[in-house]
Image: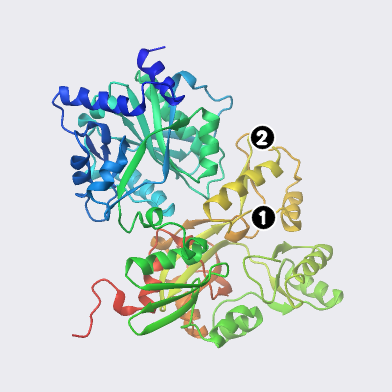
């Protein structure tokens, strides 16, 4: 084992010499070489290598030079109290843990990761796709023009690409410490690990970590470090499985709006769900006061000047009780939009068995849904027999005694978000699906995917193991205990609601004008300032549609990176907009 690696392993076990003496020796090495402190730009901010700075004052001064809109990170800080003492009102100790994997402890994977490949970011389109993923995960995008060049020791970004659709489903950044700052310990680090929360392929995050480990091992390096939030149990479980152990070092950052959740500490806004939190975060950025009224229900009040507006997620005081009722009661929605001349499915209330059977015989294929329901609860799709129909009606009555029957229409499920009678976002909603690996049962695949979705959405999205899922599986000739062959895709539900495991594909840029016009026309007919319209379409860039539902409390977070929260707060507080005209 190399001497430096053995030394580092003793350090991890708490043996002497101490971590502070190691940092001092590293700093002396760099001073002896007359090397400038190392500050690498990563496209979203700089990594400041703490032990390459001669003193705490110099490191603090460099942190205070952080550019607006960026996030600088000082890592490997041996004496953080000395750095914080230089600017206690502007700097804070980051509550993340640093983990290290010595490559002598690494064991290759026993399984093969299928369906996606990992490669370096190479083109402008790669950067666009990677940044879209980072925005979806609430991370800062990368400006490739700001990156420290590779020849000067700058970082390299990698992406995981689905081999079927060529979509970017994961990304990470790697830094070679020897190239970056002549690290005598011959280390490396991983940053910006992100996986698309809607990705159905298992193991993308693990594959990215292993790829960087094996890449840096091939370069003769000794270890890989990474930083993870102290309470991120899911990530820590993965890293522990790979052999990472905690490293006794510290990270210091500057207080800014990006880092605010890290230094303000737990508060009432932390208890809000993602659909409320995205609005509150935008309000905070504009200096709008936020009063959390009931975090569990997503209720909060926004206050700006003399204007107060109460919200429940994206439902606000600006939506009248009448407009809300028109959306909630799907029979009223149907009548209102029919009078407006929009294309709608055939519809009637469920009655006796004979009446239901007659409507099924007329329409051949039906959809069942509670009259007043949300989040896809009680919805059953493509019912073709009287027995299926009656079972679905009984299930729907658990949510509302009144049950609607509608004609079923083939097509893609399109959600159009209209704010202030303008189209802000559009997305195709795909039903939940799993991808087989030849080993795990469908039940296990669903449970694993639900865990990923719940972690990414704060518990708001999962695939229920209910009658509708079982019926969908049985129609395809499977059951919960079936094992799919490696790479085999299977839709496990017919509805595409995000709360039941569906996923979104943003199509805002290619939405056909006729579809946008239909959505705005519907919003005006309902007289509602914010609404999510659900349509079945042959394709998002074609004009044919059937409008099936209106949602008065649409989830804005589902449409990131489209500026949904920005446009909503514009609607609530027009004078808070950047560049808005204000009375002089």
Between 184 and 148, which is closer to the camera in this rendering? 184
Residue 113 is at least partly visible in this image = no
Label 2, label 1: how far apart the Cα atoms are: 19 Å
Between 527 and 21, which is closer to the camera in this rendering? 21
Identify the residue shown where x is 31% and y is 47%: 253
- The N terminus, quarter of image: top left
Between 313 and 523, which is closer to the camera in this rendering? 313
* Residue bearing mark 2: 485
* Residue bearing mark 1: 493
Report the residue that reaches farthest toward the left: 34
* Neighbour tally class for label 2: few under 14, some 14-19, many 20 plus, Cα within 10 Å: few
Identify the residue shown where x is 30% and y is 56%: 256
Give x and y (percent) for residue 96.
42, 43
470 on left or right of 57 = right
**Which badge, 2 or 1, comes first in the chain's sequence?**
2
For label 1, the SS is loop
- The C terminus, quarter of image: bottom left
| The quarter of the displayed image where residue 309 is located | bottom left
Give x and y (percent) for residue 352.
85, 77
For label 2, the SS is loop
Give x and y (percent) for residue 219.
34, 20
Identify the residue shown where x is 52% and y is 62%: 271
Residue 546 is at least partly visible in this image = yes
Q: How many marks?
A: 2
360 in relation to 271, above or below = below
Give x and y (percent) for residue 569.
38, 73
| The quarter of the displayed image where residue 194 is located | top left
Between 485 and 293, which is closer to the camera in this rendering? 293
**Mark number for residue 201?**
none
534 on left or right of 26 = right
């Amino acid at each position: 084992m190399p001497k430096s690696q053995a030394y580092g392993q003793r350090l991890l076990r708490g043996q002497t010499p101490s971590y502070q003496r190691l940092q001092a020796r590293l700093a002396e090495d760099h001073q002896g070489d007359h090397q400038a402190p190392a500050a690498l730009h990563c496209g979203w901010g700089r990594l400041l290598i703490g032990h390459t700075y001669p003193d705490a004052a110099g490191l603090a001064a460099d942190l205070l030079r952080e550019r607006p809109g960026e996030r600088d990170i000082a890592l490997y800080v041996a004496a953080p109290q000395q750095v914080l003492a230089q600017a206690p009102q502007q700097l804070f100790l980051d509550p993340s843990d640093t983990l290290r994997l010595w490559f002598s402890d690494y064991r290759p994977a026993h399984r093969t990761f299928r369906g996606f490949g990992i490669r370096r970011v190479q083109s402008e389109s790669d950067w666009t796709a990677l940044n879209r993923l980072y925005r979806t995960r609430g991370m800062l995008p990368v400006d490739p023009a700001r990156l420290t060049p590779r020849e000067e020791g700058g970082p390299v970004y990698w992406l995981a690409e689905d081999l079927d659709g060529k979509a970017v489903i994961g990304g990470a950044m790697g830094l070679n410490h020897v190239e970056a700052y002549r690290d005598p310990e011959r280390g490396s680090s991983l940053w910006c690990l992100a996986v698309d929360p809607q990705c159905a392929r298992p193991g993308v995050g693990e594959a990215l970590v292993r790829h960087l480990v094996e890449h840096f091992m091939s370069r003769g390096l000794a270890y890989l470090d990474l930083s993870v939030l102290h309470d991120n149990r899911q990530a820590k479980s993965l890293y522990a499985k790979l052999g990472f152990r905690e490293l006794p070092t510290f990270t210091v950052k500057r207080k800014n709006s990006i880092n605010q959740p890290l230094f303000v500490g737990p508060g009432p806004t932390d208890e809000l769900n993602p659909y409320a939190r995205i609005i509150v975060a935008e309000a905070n950025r504009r200096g709008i006061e936020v009063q959390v009224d009931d975090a569990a229900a997503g209720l909060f009040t926004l206050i700006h000047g003399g204007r107060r507006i109460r919200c429940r997620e994206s439902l606000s005081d600006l939506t009248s009780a009448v407009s809300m009722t028109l959306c909630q009661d799907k029979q009223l929605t149907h009548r209102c939009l029919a009078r407006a001349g929009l294309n709608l499915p055939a519809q009637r209330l469920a009655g006796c068995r004979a009446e239901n059977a007659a409507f099924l015989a007329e329409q051949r294929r039906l959809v069942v849904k509670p009259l007043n329901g949300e989040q896809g609860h009680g919805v059953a799709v493509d019912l073709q027999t009287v027995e299926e129909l009656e079972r679905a009606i009984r299930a729907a009555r658990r949510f509302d005694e009144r049950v609607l029957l509608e004609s079923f229409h083939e097509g893609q499920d399109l959600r159009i978000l209209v704010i202030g009678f303008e189209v802000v976002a559009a997305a195709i909603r795909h039903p939940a699906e799993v991808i087989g690996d030849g080993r795990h049962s469908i039940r296990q695949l669903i449970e694993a995917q639900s865990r990923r979705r719940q972690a990414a959405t704060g518990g708001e999205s999962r695939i229920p193991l209910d009658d509708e899922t079982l019926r969908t599986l049985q129609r395809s000739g499977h059951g919960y205990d079936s094992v799919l062959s490696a790479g085999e895709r299977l839709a496990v539900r017919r509805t595409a609601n995000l709360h039941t495991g569906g996923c979104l594909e943003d199509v805002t840029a290619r939405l056909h004008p006729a579809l946008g016009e239909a959505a705005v026309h519907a919003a005006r007919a309902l007289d509602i300032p914010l609404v999510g319209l659900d349509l079945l379409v042959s394709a998002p860039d074609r004009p044919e549609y059937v409008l099936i539902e209106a949602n008065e409390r649409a989830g804005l977070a589902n449409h990131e990176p489209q500026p949904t929260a920005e446009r909503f707060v514009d609607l609530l507080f027009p004078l808070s907009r950047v560049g808005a005209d204000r009375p002089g």
